[in-house]
Amino acid sequence: MSSINRIANVASHLSNSQISTNNNASGDIGLIGLAVMGQNLILNAADHGYTVVAYNRTVAKVDEFLANEAKGKSIIGAHSIKELCANLKRPRRIILLVKAGSPVDAFIEQLLPFLEKGDIIIDGGNSHFPDSNRRYAELGEKGIYFVGSGVSGGEEGARYGPSLMPGGAKEAWPHIKDIFQDIAAKTDGEPCCDWVGEAGAGHYVKMVHNGIEYGDMQLICEAYDLLKRVGKFTDKEIGDVFAKWNKGVLDSFLIEITRDILYFNDPTDGVPVLEKILDTAGQKGTGKWTAINALDLGMPVTLIGEAVFSRCLSALKSERVRASKVLGGPSVEGESPITDREKFVDDLEQALYASKIISYAQGFMLIREAAKEYGWKLNNPAIALMWRGGCIIRSVFLGEITSAYRENPDLENLLFHPFFKNAITKAQSGWRASIGKAIEYGVPVPAFTTALSFYDGYRSEKLPANLLQAQRDYFGAHTFQTLPGKENDFLKGDWIHVNWTGRGGNISASTYDA
Ligand code: 6PG
């Protein structure tokens, strides 16, 4: 019996007798975890007229919050889990904004003795979706509704309008819909929050959001690197390029903050702070989870995979420093070889745009497969809309994706939609030219190149996997199928093994695919 189950049993035993009733309770929603995201979300909800009950494990933080940021607002401080629960209207709605992993389970255990059937626990952290699947099932057995909600937008988003991606027990949705949609970001008046789907679907969609975030960031870094290393642009000039791009098809939060980062100088010497930052990327794991899940589901989400590996390569700093001294290859010393700077920048904009289209097409391919694999009914237009505003990957581009899925929610692939098909066709020459320059001058562009290779692979009627199948059959008798119409007396049956060397037998290995 899991710890949640154990405590829940105690809870059901206690529920009608010993738990303090809360008929006079005034709290609309409770929130546990007063780190920056938690505090900002509470202030956001209070601004929208909700009474929020706040609790934190280190209780002193509750008093500090009440005496400062929360002063004069409809926020009640709780000094224990019991007090938190007693101050909430029924069904109780409690958001956990604590570190993903065991802290979430620990708080659920502490909450259960004070909850009743129909109460709602919402995990708003970056939890791994299998954990949310488990919590949904375990709590569901006890009559407690579990919601795993993606929350994106960082500090400012939490305060003034995040993107919220709730999924789990659908019964909870009518009870949380108004609060969630009121505090969420709005795009053209529509809230960037809707019901995502069953069990861990909310956290799954947030995971893919983060994977796409990794991809977008990597693409931007590659563009910056090319402008710097090949174009020999200064940081200020690169900032100007991003400022220009932010007025066109690439208009997005990440392009905008990149512009601001490039313009930001150290006041002590006027040097861009960016050029003083160690080139070693960190990661908390959500991009890695997306890439692992893509491998598990057999989906070629290559761009996110490369983005994760690029962070890994960046982390091998001392090894790279040694390699830079011994491994030869092209590089640009001195003057830039680029004569037409305007074309160089325009080509790069197209490379970014086309690669981004591929990345989102791959992301939605993964979501589609996950829906099939896990039996979720996922709402593609709503997912695109939830990412349109409030979150880190918010962009004008997601407006186009929303329209595409609104037109056809079952669209097989974004690349088949006329808007994206035409956009990528138009962007192709610039895309290929930019990658050509990167290869010629030795600048790594793994995300740009994997996007283009995916595109060329996806549009290839025939790939060299015939040779691969032959190799597998040659050394391991793994068998192959023939092209339609190519069967004959020698190539007979569904799965064929050929004795390639004359030495092997006619016994084939069993046929299965991982
Ligand atoms: C968001 C962000 C947020 C966090 C990333 C950082 O949507 O608000 O995605 O969740 O900033 O998880 O991830 P890394 O530390 O792995 O870059």
Image (cartoon, grey):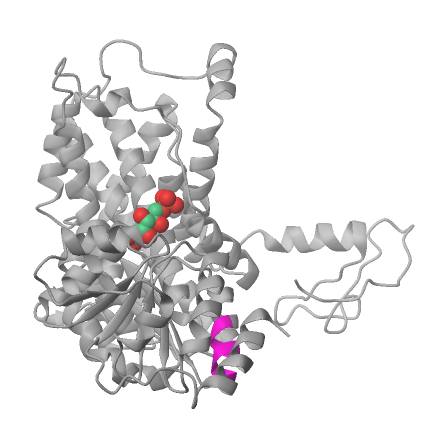
Q: Work out whether residue 14 or residue 225 is closer to the camera in this orientation and state it.
A: 14
| 481 to 456, vertically: above or below | below
- Quadrant of residue 181 within the rendered picture: bottom left
Q: Work out whether residue 218 or residue 155 is closer to the camera in this orientation and state it.
A: 155
| 59 to 281, vertically: above or below | below
> Can residue 324 be seen?
yes
Q: Quadrant of the N terminus?
A: bottom right
Q: Is residue 157 left or right of residue 474?
A: left
> Can residue 397 be seen?
no
Q: Is residue 309 left or right of residue 448?
A: right
Q: Work out whether residue 35 or residue 374 is closer to the camera in this orientation and state it.
A: 35
- Quadrant of residue 241 within the rendered picture: top left
- Quadrant of residue 29 within the rendered picture: bottom left
Q: Is residue 49 magenta?
A: no
Q: Is residue 138 magenta?
A: yes
Residue beneath the point at 15% across and 42% down: 256
Dominant SS of magenta comes to helix
Q: Is residue 327 left or right of residue 38?
A: right
Where is residue 227 shown, x and y percent of the image? 23, 27
Where is residue 397 shown, x and y percent of the image? 19, 57
Q: How many marks?
A: 0
Where is residue 271 shown, x and y percent of the image? 17, 17
The part of the chain drawn in magenta is 135-142
Residue beneath the point at 48% across and 54% down: 289
Residue beneath the point at 20% across and 41% down: 349
Residue beneath the point at 12% across and 24% down: 236
Where is residue 43 shown, x and y percent of the image? 15, 60
| 445 to 163, vertically: above or below | above
Q: Quadrant of the C terminus?
A: bottom right
Residue at the bottom extreme of this rendering: 16
Q: Is residue 110 left or right of residue 392?
A: right
